[in-house]
């Protein structure tokens, strides 16, 4: 998903605003446009492509199909007020999608010219990304901006193998999926200050499964893992007074399991992780600056081994860590900072 260049919400100013002023201006656009000289400009682009091909040779056959679609449209409305000032409102929508499907088959022959083995592979991929930006430029250096983007992705793979040698059969499946979302609102209030918010979410998951059989034994494995992250921030400054608050959460879950026809038999394992953080700042220029921050992390893992003979073997562990910190500075002097890190088990307390 990192192959496109659409901008993300994190490029927004660190401090700047809610969408309410922007929504008000856009909603009232028709009212002031009806009575004022206006200019409307529209531009757009559309690009698409499709490529396909195949190869057929003795013992092998393959084919592929790829395609993409890119679209963008921009609308800008400019109106002049009776006092000569100008108001400009604009909207941009952009999107991109690409997909691919690949297939390959390969077979081998024995001396008797009979099929001795067949290999089949399939790979499919789909990814999209959309983004919308709305902006308004008002008199006196006031700018408003709102942005939203989303990017889902899916990838599937499959491999099958059958071989007469050793009566070998294998099937391997894989799947991954991801989703990213970001949004932000900002307002530059000119000499007065600026305010803004931003939000980002990310989720990812994958699955694997393998079946491997032969005359000497067999193995079945499967596993999955998933992860998510999200972050939110709001901040602003008014004259010499500034403040910001940011929070983030994350999580991870994974599992792996295997069964083998020979020792060690069954093996299973899992892991989990959770995290949460907070950071806050408050300052008055050349007078005082205060910061407070916390972070919590929880991790855990477990593993089980079950031989074909004998009892199971189990391993487990868990750990939690808490960090507290802060700083304070006055009259532009070097801030005094400190904190604690608490972990367990066993319990440990460390000054920071």
Image: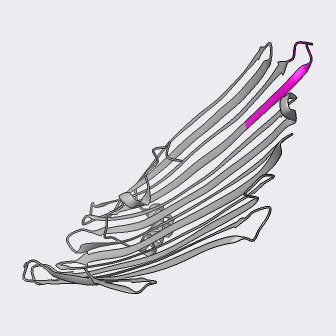
**What residue sits 44% from the left and 65% below the top?**
184
Is 118 within the magenta?
Answer: yes
Residue 329 in the image, given as x and y percentages of width and height: 13, 83
| Magenta span main SS | strand
Total numbered circles:
0
Residue 275 in the image, given as x and y percentages of width and height: 48, 74
On the rendered structure, is 307 left or right of 26? right
Q: Quadrant of residue 306?
A: bottom right
**What residue sits 22% from the left and 75% below the top?**
192
On the rendered structure, is 204 left or right of 81? right
Q: Quadrant of residue 100?
A: top right
Q: Residue at the far front: name it.
A: 310
On the rendered structure, is 340 left or right of 91? left
Residue 233 in the image, given as x and y percentages of width and height: 39, 73
**What residue sits 86% from the left and 39% below the top?**
215
Above or below for 232 versus 323 = above
Point out the image quarter for the C terminus: bottom left
Above or below for 162 versus 22 = above
Is 19 within the magenta?
Answer: no
Give the camera-side residue of 29 and 222: 222
Above or below for 210 versus 279 = above
**What residue sits 88% from the left and 29% below the top?**
164
Residue 308 in the image, given as x and y percentages of width and height: 80, 61
* Residue 317 visible within the image: yes
Give the camera-side residue of 30 and 342: 342
Q: What is the span of residues highlighted in magenta in the rendered image? A: 110-122
* Residue 290 visible within the image: no
């Amino acid at each position: 998903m990192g192959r496109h260049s659409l901008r993300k919400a994190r490029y927004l100013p660190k401090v700047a605003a809610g969408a309410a002023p922007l929504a008000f201006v856009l909603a009232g656009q028709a009212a002031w446009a009806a009575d004022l000289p206006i200019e409307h400009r529209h531009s757009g682009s559309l690009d698409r492509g499709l490529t396909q091909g195949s190869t057929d040779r003795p013992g092998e056959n393959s084919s592929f199909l790829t395609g993409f679609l890119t679209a963008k449209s921009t609308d800008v409305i400019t109106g002049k007020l009776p006092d000569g000032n100008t108001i400009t409102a604009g909207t941009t929508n952009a999107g991109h999608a690409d997909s691919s499907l690949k297939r390959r088959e390969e077979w081998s022959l024995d001396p008797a010219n009979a099929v001795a083995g067949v290999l089949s592979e399939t790979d499919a991929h789909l990814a999209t990304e959309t983004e919308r930006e709305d902006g308004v430029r008002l008199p006196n250096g006031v700018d408003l901006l709102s942005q939203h983007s989303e990017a889902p992705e899916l990838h599937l793979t499959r491999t099958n193998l059958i071989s007469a040698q050793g009566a070998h059969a294998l099937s391997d499946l894989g799947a991954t999926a991801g989703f990213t979302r970001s949004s932000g609102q900002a307002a530059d209030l000119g000499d007065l200050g600026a305010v803004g918010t931003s939000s980002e979410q990310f989720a990812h998951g994958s699955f694997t499964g393998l079946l491997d059989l032969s005359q000497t034994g067999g193995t079945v494995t499967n596993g999955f893992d998933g992860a998510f992250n999200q972050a939110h921030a709001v901040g602003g400054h008014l004259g010499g007074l500034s403040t910001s608050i940011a929070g983030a959460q994350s999580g991870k879950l994974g599992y792996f399991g295997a069964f083998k026809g020979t020792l060690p038999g069954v093996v299973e394992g899992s892991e989990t992780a959770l995290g949460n953080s907070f950071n806050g700042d408050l300052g008055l220029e050349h007078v005082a600056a205060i910061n407070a921050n916390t972070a919590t992390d929880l991790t855990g893992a477990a593993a089980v081994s079950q031989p074909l003979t004998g009892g199971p073997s189990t391993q487990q562990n868990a750990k939690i860590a808490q960090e507290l910190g802060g700083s304070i500075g006055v009259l532009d002097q070097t801030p005094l900072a400190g904190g604690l890190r608490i972990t367990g088990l066993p319990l440990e307390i460390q000054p920071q």
